[in-house]
Amino acid sequence: MLWRNQTLSFDFILLGIFDHSSTHTFLFSLVLGIFTVAFMGNIAMILLIYLDTQLHTPMYFLLSQLSLMDLMLICTTVPRMAFGYLSGRKSISLAGCGAQIFFYVSLLGAECFLLAVMAYDRYVAICHPLRYTILMNQKLCALMTVASWILGSLDGVIVLVEVLSLSYCNSLVIHHFFCDVAALFPLSCTDTSAFERLLFICCVVMLILPVSVIIISYSHVLQAVIRMSSTESRRKAFTTCSSHLSVVGLYYGAVMFMYMRPASIHTPDQDKIVSAFYTILTPMLNPLIYSLRNKEVSRGLQKLLRKGK
């Protein structure tokens, strides 16, 4: 119950990722540009899927949820980082730090499970097209989406409770641009080995299990695509699946590298770069990958723009 006495007693100091040199000022401007593209791109994807009735299918509903998660994830880290850089106020309270940890861990977990649901959706659509409306009906799609949000939030609560139960008596300087769990370990004067084991178990559940579902789903999809006689059907299936696999590779690769390694071999600079990749760059790339490589999304966007004119 140590955290009860700490909640309002001190602030952490976020060192951030940039200083005020000319090079870092340019990089900061670049990050703001990426944030703007990600923000607008994910909002556009959500609105497009909502407004275009031809996109009211399980696949695009799941894609809209992915865009919502990406939008919330990038808004969890970048605005606070930008505020600290521009104002010079780098302090963040334990309560604020806890809120940031809860949201980004919950969103990371929810996105992991959602990507597995999206892989299952492609498996049913390609391997069992005649039974698609039965095996992937709207009710089941909604239930699996809600389950992804709930499981991600549960993981966020578990990590948050553990973080708040630690006692912080070392330096309160966080070598990161947001409150990352791994960056808090060196600041604790209590033994974090049990917490590190719990975090590893959470990562196994959040990463390994969904990855297993994705691998099994796409192994069946690959077999089905190879057996297709129509070149057009094979091309369409490959385009849709390659978009999803690109997102999966970008996301899971960075998160596994970040959280499946022992805390003892983490370095602050390395953690900042990897974290920036999956919390800033990936949310920008996801809508671009799906819009540029998906004819239905591109067609819906063009139709919406013509209506606007």
Image (spheres, rainbow, N blue to C red):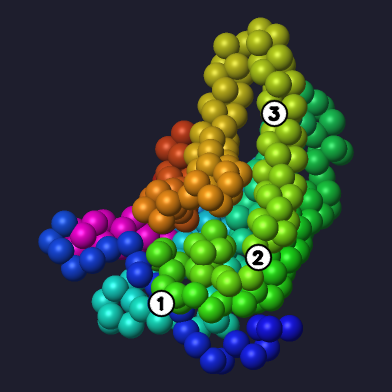
Q: Position of residue 258 (x, y in %)?
A: 53, 47
Which of disc 3 and disc 1 is earlier in sequence?
Answer: 1
Q: CA distance from mark 3 to mark 2?
A: 37 Å
Considering the numbered disc 2 on the image, is that residue within a helix, a strand or a loop? loop
Which of disc 2 and disc 3 is earlier in sequence?
Answer: 2
Region rendered in magenta: 24-39
Nearest to viewer (mark 1 / mark 3): 1
Residue 191, numbered circle: 2
Q: Residue at x 56, y 77 (%)?
A: 168
Where is mark 1, residue-wise? 13
Q: Position of residue 249 (x, y in %)?
A: 54, 35
Q: Main secondary structure of the magenta part?
A: helix
Considering the numbered disc 3 on the image, is that residue within a helix, a strand or a loop? helix
Is 86 left or right of 191, judged from the image as shown?
left
Q: Are marks 3 and 2 in contact (CB under 8 Å)?
A: no
Q: Position of residue 257 (x, y in %)?
A: 53, 42
Tell me which amino acid carries mark 2: Asp
Q: Is residue 198 above or below residue 237?
A: below
